Image (tube, grey):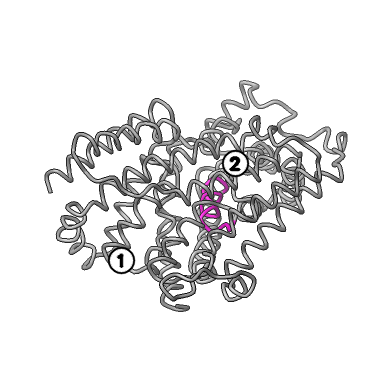
Amino acid sequence: MLMLILEVLVMAVLVIYGLRIGGALGVGILSILGLFIMIFVFQVPIGKAPVVPVMIILAIGIAGGLLEASGGLDYLVHYAGKLIEKKPSAITFVSPLIIFGFVFGIGTANITLSLEPIIARTALRAGIRPERPLVACVTTANMALVCSPAASSAIVAFGFLNGYGGYTFGQYLMIVLPAALISTLALSIFMSFRGKPLDKDPVYQQRLAEGKIDDDMLHDKFADSEVPVFTRQQKLSVLAFLASVALILLLGTNESLLHKLTTPNVVNGKEVFMPATSTVQIFMFLAAAAIIFITKKSPAVIYKTQIFTAAVSAAIAVLGPGWLGATIFQSPDNALVLQESVGSLIAVAPWFIVIICGVVATFVMSQTAIISIIYPLALGLGVPPGFMAAMIQAVNVNYFIPAQPTLLFAEEIDPTGSTQKYRFWLPGVFSLLVSITVGMAMWKLVL
């Protein structure tokens, strides 16, 4: 037990320091340093590298990067903004649902960054405290991510549940999707009463008196002056990407159809079909190829895109902690210690794994990396796969140490000063509790 605690402490120190000096990329690199220490200093046998999650992230990053480079992402953001602006008085309810839909379809929460200025401006012009829709949208984007067939976190989580409990992607979605949607609605209601109205907010009134809120922020004088023109290539790029996401969703939720369309391998006399997780990689590369043919762009354009850059960083953030975590927690000696100590506790109180996941998520700010560390550990200790699906939102406890770009940008973009990074805690915990409660009910009800 003492050696395991020491190894975990080394991992924690390296992860925290890596986060401090280099964000997700720093975490990944210093975790590999931790892997070196475990293998050559502590003499722990090397664990299995999370190759499949890394491949999924890179495939999504390449397709998403080409969508961004083609201008297709601009097309989506423009019309998402128009939808948000249509119902300004209901922005605290409308904008999170729009964000949810776009993140679910595109598989990246980064689209929120492009919409946050529109959300803040629309709320201000409607006389609504911008904190309310901004906090709801940032939190909702994370919740939608672990439901998306185009997001690595959802696919990797499903892969573990499929391996341990034979879950299909459809069964996974039957738990996590209603939980996330109901939690989004509950969060919007919660945020509708959060903070003082602008006319009673002293910080906003002071900024208004000092002239820090100019007339252009309050009144849109140029609403119809600039109407962007989108090309056929941009629209077809979006269609190609969304068609691939739809095929991933179709085959992931209907494995019998996938089996009919593919030829199995024969291993030890048994037919072994292609796993549903492989469809993500194949169809994301299919989307990338289609976008290249449509736009005639060089694949090298992805190197300058935000989505691909974030994907590379995320891939390393998953590789490092995932490989280090597998090495520590899956070694025979440590696995026995965990089974005898933590395993007995989790058997009596499985909720303890939610706390462990939340603590890890506070420091490792990559949902896929957290899943790669926690899910095999918990499932190996006997936690039911349905429980792990129900508590999936615990991987989004990334607000106690506010380093998430969408969270920080929400504070920066709000001219009223109502959005503050440390005020995400209560809404975050509230949405987590609602999602877990609904997820547990769905697990017991439908499976």
Question: Which residue position holds label 2?
Answer: 110
> Magenta part of the protein: which range?
137-149
Three-letter residue code for mark 2: Asn
The residue furthest left is 2
Instruction: Count neighbours of disc 1 (C-alpha within 10 A) and say few if under 14, some if 14 to 19, many if 20 or more.
Output: many
Kind of element beneath mark 1: loop
Count of marks, rendered view: 2
* Helix, strand or loop for the magenta stretch, by majority: helix
Question: Which residue position holds label 1?
Answer: 383
* Viewer-side label of 1, 2: 1
Closer to the N terminus: mark 1 or mark 2?
A: 2
Kind of element beneath mark 2: loop
Q: Quadrant of the C terminus?
A: bottom left
Residue at horizontal 59 percent and vertical 56 percent from the top: 280
Q: Is residue 200 magenta?
A: no
Image location (x, y in percent) of residue 150: 60, 54
Three-letter residue code for mark 1: Val
Q: 355 or 83, which lies in front?
A: 355
Q: Are marks 1 and 2 in contact (CB under 8 Å)?
A: no
Residue 6, picture quadrant: top left
Q: Is residue 146 magenta?
A: yes
Instruction: Count neighbours of disc 2 (C-alpha within 10 A) and say few if under 14, some if 14 to 19, many if 20 or more.
Output: some
Image location (x, y in percent) of residue 355: 30, 53
User: Residue 118, which numbered label?
Assistant: none
Residue 198, picture quadrant: top right
Residue at horizontal 36 percent and vertical 42 percent from the top: 321
